[in-house]
Amino acid sequence: MKNVLEIINLPSSAINFIGGQFKYLHDEGGYRMHLICSPGDGIREFCEENEVCYHPVRLDRQISLIQDVKSLISICSYIRREKIDVVIAHQPKGRLLGMLACLIMRVRYRVIFSHGVLYETMTGLKRKLIMFYEKFVSSIADRVVCVSKYVQERRLADHIDEPGKQLVLGRGSCNGIDTVNKFNPREVSDQDIQRLRETYKICDNDFVIGFCGRLVRDKGVVELIDAFQQIIDDKKNMSIKLLIVGQFEKRDSLPMEIIEFITSNPNIIFTGPVPYEKIQQIYMLMNVLVLPTHREGFGMVAIEASAMERPVIVSNYTGCAETMIDGETGLYIDKSPESIKRAIEKCFDNDFSRKLGANGRNFVMTNFEHTKVRKYMLDFLNAYCKEVE
C-alpha cells in the first residue's frame, strides 16, 4: 500500500474542496492517505471520518522565513517517519514547501495542483518573482494537475511547465461537486428558503443578483457595484437586490467607498462569509449568480450555482469560462460594467432564466459530478505510479 501525502494550506480547503476524495482514494485505490495542513476547527474530525492520517503544520499564506523553515523541517520529518511515497501539494505555500521537502527527502512521486494563475493580474517585479517561483516549483514536480484548460494553456504559453507534465481531470476542477446530496435544489426545503428570505428581508417580487467570493478587486466587485448602480437607476419600476456573500480582504482590497456602499446601501444584502454546509441554500435565494472575476483558475461557485439551477454570468476569460456554455447554461461578460448590466437584464426574462438554470444543472451533472472527477484522479494516480515504478 503506497502512502500518499496531500499538503494544503487551509483546513477549510481540505474539507470543502478535496473532501471525500481522500476516502475514495483509500477505498477504491488502496492508498494510505495523509494530510498536512494548518490546524483549524473540524479538521481532526474530518480526517477521522475519511480515514486520513493528519499531521498539523502551520502553513502561513505570507512569507515568514523562520516559520517556513520550521514548517519545512516538520514536513520532512513526517515524510521520513511515515515513509511517504507520493506527495500531492496544493496552494502556493503548500506547493513550495511540499516540493522542497520532496527534493530533500528524495520522494519518488511528486505532484502539484495548479488552482489558478497567481501572477495573471500582477505587473512589474512582483509578476516576475511569482513567475520565477512557479517555474522553480514546477521544475521539482513530476506532474502538474491544472484545474482548467485555461490554466494549462496559460502555464504552457508562459513557459512555467515543461511540455508533457500537465493534465486536467476531465473538464476541470480538483474534485467536482456533489450534485446529488448537496448541490441539488430538490434537497433544499421550501421552509428553509422561506426562513432565509425572512432573515435577509427578501420579498417575493425582489429580483436578487448574487455574488459569492472574496471581496477584492480581482473578483470584479468594483465593476459589479457599478453595473448594479446603473440597473437600479434604469429600472426604477423593479425591486432589485444585490446579495453579496463573502468577506473583505486586505490584500487587493476594495476602495473604501465601495466597502461603504456595500455595507450601507439598503438594496444590498451583505451576509459576510457563509458556512460551506449552508451555501447551497443561499444560492436558492438568487435569481442569477454573477462572477465578473479578472483572475480565476476554474470558478467553483459557478458550477455550484448551476447545479442549483441558477443561471450564471461569468467572465469570458480565465478558467471560469469553462464552467458553462454561453447562451445555453449562462452568459459571458467582459470586464466592463455595461457588459455585466446587459447580461443581468437578459435574465429578467423568467423563461430564459429557467432554461439556463435547467441546462446548467444538466451540464454540471454530466461534467463535474464529484464521483466522475474522483475517478479521473484515481486513474491518474494509478497510471502515474505504475509509470514511474
Image: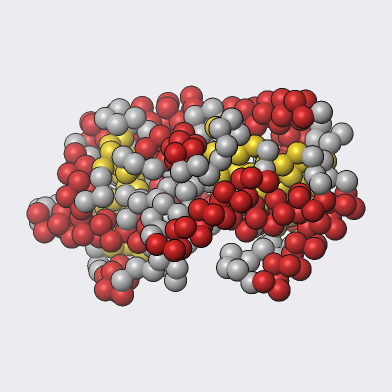
* Residue 166 visible here: no
Q: Nearer the viewer, residue 57 or 245?
A: 57
Write down the quadrant of residue 163 in the picture.
top right
Left or right: where 238 falls relative to 312: left
Left or right: where 147 falls relative to 12: left
How many marks can you see?
0
Please name the residue shown 80% across and 44% down the image.
107
Q: Please say which color scheme the image uses.
A: secondary structure
The image shows residue 8 at horizontal and vertical percentages of 66, 53
Write down the quadrant of residue 219 in the picture.
bottom left
Q: Nearer the viewer, residue 263 or 218?
A: 218
The image shows residue 180 at horizontal and vertical percentages of 54, 32
* 38 versus 263 height, above or below: above
User: Which quarter of the rendered picture does the N terminus lie within?
Assistant: top right
The image shows residue 361 at horizontal and vertical percentages of 42, 31
* 383 versus 301 height, above or below: above
* 151 versus 244 height, above or below: above
The image shows residue 367 at horizontal and vertical percentages of 49, 27
Please name the residue shown 58% across and 68% down the image.
62
Please name the residue shown 53% across and 44% down the image.
160
Please name the residue shown 26% across and 30% down the image.
327
* Residue 279 visible here: yes
Left or right: where 266 falls relative to 76: left
Left or right: where 42 falls relative to 31: left
User: Which quarter of the rendered picture does the C terminus lie within?
Assistant: top right
